[in-house]
Amino acid sequence: MIVIGLAYGSLAALAGGRTELAMQRLLDGLLALPRLPILIVILLVVGLNGSLWTLVPALAVTNWMITARLVRGEVATLLRTDFVRAARGVGASRRQILFRHLIPNSLGVLIVAVFLELPAMILGESFLSVLGLGPGPPAATWGTLAQDAILQGRLYELVLPSAAIAVFAVSANLVADALHQALDPRQS
């Protein structure tokens, strides 16, 4: 998720012009598609073996797009800074500018993007586990705990995994906000 989003967003911003516009329209189209049905199709095509080794790549394939959008915006902003202009002026190649200046200076946005995507990944896993498409026993995830409570008819046991998911989602968003404020040099 991180690598795909970083690569796509950086390349889109570096390309500029019509290429950037085409890459952004493709990204908009992908963001318009519902993620959970796509996840279900991917899991059915790949095969359900009930392991995290199948589920994690499927979640990564469907959750890289917001990271790519945030990274593209940050890299596009950084391309207009004085230090990037200076690097171009002394003859630095696009590759050198990307790896020495743009990616290191976009790590703050990348870390924030990861914390913003974590709740979506957890909710996706939980939903798929409740449907029976997630990892099975002995894996203990919040989704498998919820599925077990439903299958056993003990709906009161749904409270704990549901509350844990909700607390995690809120906490991840609060951490993302705090990291954004701490890592963004433009914040005073």
Image: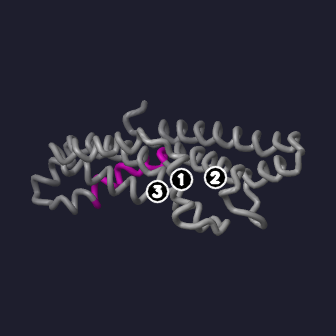
Q: CA distance from mark 1 to mark 3?
A: 9 Å
The answer to whether residue 87 is seen in the rendering is: yes
- Label 1–label 3 contact, CB within 8 A: no
> Which residue lies at the image location 86% right of the left edge and 44% below the top edge?
157
Q: Is residue 31 left or right of residue 128?
A: left
7 or 51: nearer the viewer: 51
Q: Earlier in the sequence, mark 1 or mark 3?
A: 1
Q: Position of residue 108 (x, y in %)?
A: 43, 47
**Callout 2 amino acid:** Glu
Q: Which residue is mark 1?
A: 39
Mark 2 secondary-structure assignment: helix
Q: Is residue 85 left or right of residue 53?
A: left
Q: Quadrant of residue 101?
A: bottom left
Q: Is residue 107 left or right of residue 135?
A: left
Q: Position of residue 145 (x, y in %)?
A: 79, 52
Q: CA distance from mark 2 to mark 3?
A: 13 Å
- The image shows residue 157, relative to residue 56, as above or below, that is above
Q: Which residue is mark 2?
A: 125
Residues rendered magenta in the picture: 99-113
Neighbor class of circle 3 (other Cα within 10 Å; few <14, some 14-19, many 20+) is some
Q: Which mark is residue 61?
A: 3
Does the segment drawn in magenta span residue 7? no
Mark 3 secondary-structure assignment: helix
Q: CA distance from mark 1 to mark 2?
A: 10 Å
> Which residue lies at the image location 58% right of the left edge and 38% below the top edge?
173
